């Protein structure tokens, strides 16, 4: 039985995954790295600095950590520029209603995002109060695919990991959820997220009557 639902943020609740891609692409262009949406799948769910390393690996470039940090900071400024213009209406249709429905059924709700900007995004979407617990990239040491973030989220809502259902759009996130011993719904394509227990194209497609099937 599922007693807790844990949501990723970028690409699950709102399309900030696209803003991350545009910002990384701009940096890649400046560095002369060819960077496609397919390449971007590897960056989803992982931390800012891990994303930086993957981008450099894709481009076959090497640089010291100070320079990497400067470039990752620059990418973050571009990303935050997009974020600060966000309106509450940008939340994916039906997601706020889903969160409310789950809570009205007594299901505990947590957010588990690798992003250090997660709380700000929730504030701008006006949904910070919809969660029983919020865990973000500032609160963990190991990012997805490590299970740490999901285990921390489960402990914050006091639900056994086995009774948690994770909503994830990243391959690294699906792996993290499974490593945590949780059930997982992949939001996106079978090709990318095939290891998940179920795939949906949109978060709001989840039918709360299906909670008992996990
Ligand atoms: C994850 C995104 O949610 O957060 C990644 O899927 C991103 O693409 C990561 O790199 C870290 O985000 P931030 O906002 O801390 O740079
Ligand atoms: Mg995501």
Image (cartoon, rainbow, N blue to C red):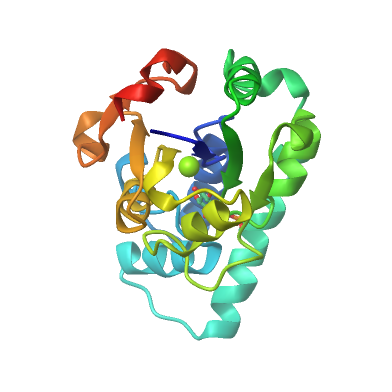
> Looking at the image, which residue is at 58% across and 79% down?
67
> Looking at the image, which residue is at 22% across and 30% down?
190
Q: Is residue 211 left or right of residue 117?
A: left
Tell me which corner region of the image, top left, top right, bottom left or bottom right, holds residue 69. Answer: bottom right
Q: Is residue 85 visible in the rendered structure shown here?
A: no
Q: Is residue 39 left or right of residue 115?
A: left
**Count of marks, rendered view:** 0
Q: Nearer the viewer, residue 20 or 108?
A: 108
Q: Is residue 2 visible in the rendered structure shown here?
A: yes
Q: Quadrant of the N terminus?
A: top left
> Looking at the image, which residue is at 37% across and 50% down?
177
Image position of 62 with respect to 72: above or below:
below
Q: Position of residue 131 (x, y in %)?
A: 69, 37
> Looking at the image, which residue is at 36% across and 60% down?
145
Q: Is residue 191 left or right of residue 173?
A: left
Image position of 176 with respect to 122: above or below:
below
Q: Position of residue 137 (x, y in %)?
A: 61, 60
Q: Position of residue 86 (x, y in %)?
A: 75, 30
Q: Position of residue 178 (x, y in %)?
A: 30, 51
Image position of 179 with respect to 119: above or below:
below
Q: Nearer the viewer, residue 41 or 109?
A: 109
Tell me which corner region of the image, top left, top right, bottom left or bottom right, holds residue 100. Answer: top right
Q: Nearer the viewer, residue 145 or 98?
A: 98
Q: Quadrant of the C terminus?
A: top left
């Amino acid at each position: 039985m599922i007693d807790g639902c844990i949501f990723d943020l970028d690409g699950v609740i709102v399309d900030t995954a696209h803003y991350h891609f545009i910002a990384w692409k701009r940096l890649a262009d400046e560095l002369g790295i060819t960077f496609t949406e397919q390449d971007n799948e590897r960056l989803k769910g992982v931390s800012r600095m891990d994303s930086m390393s993957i981008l450099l690996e894709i481009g076959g470039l090497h640089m010291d950590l100070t320079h990497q940090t400067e470039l990752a900071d620059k990418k973050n400024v571009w990303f935050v520029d997009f974020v600060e213009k966000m309106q509450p209406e940008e939340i994916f249709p039906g997601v706020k209603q889903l969160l409310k429905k789950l809570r009205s059924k007594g299901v505990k709700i947590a957010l588990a995002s690798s992003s250090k900007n997660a709380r700000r995004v929730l504030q701008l979407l006006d949904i910070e109060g919809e969660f029983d617990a919020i865990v973000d990239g500032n609160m963990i040491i190991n990012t997805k695919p490590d299970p740490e973030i999901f285990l921390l989220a489960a402990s914050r809502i006091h639900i056994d990991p086995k009774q948690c259902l994770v909503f994830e759009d990243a391959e690294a996130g699906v792996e993290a959820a499974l490593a945590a011993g949780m059930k997982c719904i992949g939001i996106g394509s079978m090709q990318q997220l095939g290891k998940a227990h179920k795939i949906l194209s949109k978060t709001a497609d989840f039918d709360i009557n299906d909670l008992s099937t996990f």
